[in-house]
Image (cartoon, rainbow, N blue to C red):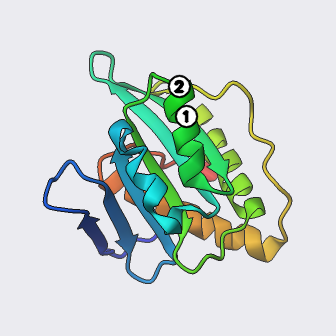
Amino acid sequence: MNKRGQTIKLYIAGDDLKNVKVAELSNWTGKAYIGERKHSKVIQRIEELSSPGVYLLFSKDLKIFQISLYIGEADEVNKRINDHFRGKDWWTDFIIFISKDTNLTKSHVRYLEKRLYEISIEKKSLIELKNSSKPTGSKLPLSEIDDMEEYLEKLQFILKNLGIINLDVDRKSV
């Protein structure tokens, strides 16, 4: 992973710190939307989220220092979060990752979903994974796999440094 420092730009919609947040890294085409369950309706109006993305639904149990986590992907990620609002009641927060330049495709987000799932399995003492089945992923050319692995590193950086979840893994075992 990158040993140099990075800048996280954090935008908070409105003047209430409990509003939806948008996180970006300098020189990265990705973008993260962070919110709480109550924001499920708000994100339906964000056109940028009517695009392919990978997302995490989570809830932290402070008594046992474990996070309940669901990893998913969708063509229109905001609509999928709304489906989960109606169908899954255990989660309290979400984070969505999309591309600022709309270059993430369905194949890309399926790849990312599978990689995040695999990483989460390695962290099973810290994570209660709520997915009922293993994601299928997708086949990508080597150049795009490398691009998605770089995207994944930036995604992990944001998750870790915003205090959401540490999904760093020992690179020797990957």
Residue type at tag 1? His
Q: Which residue is mark 1?
A: 84
- Regarding residue 174, the answer to whether it shows in the image is no
Occupied quadrant, residue 24: bottom left
Occupied quadrant, residue 87: top right
Residue type at tag 2? Lys
Left or right: residue 8 versus residue 14 is right
Q: Secondary structure at mark 2?
A: loop
Marks 1 and 2 in Cβ contact (< 8 Å): yes
Residue 15: x and y in percent read 13, 60
Q: Secondary structure at mark 1?
A: helix
Question: What residue is rendered at 48% in x and 38% in y?
Answer: 57
**Residue with the most extreme left position:** 15
- Regarding residue 43, the answer to whether it shows in the image is yes
Left or right: residue 166 versus residue 169 is left
Which residue is nearer to you in this view: 149 or 96? 96
Question: What residue is rendered at 69% in x and 57% in y?
Answer: 75
Q: Which residue is mark 2?
A: 88
Which residue is nearer to you in this view: 19 or 163? 19
Left or right: residue 161 versus residue 136 is left
Query: Distance between the Cα atoms at labels 1 and 2?
Result: 5 Å
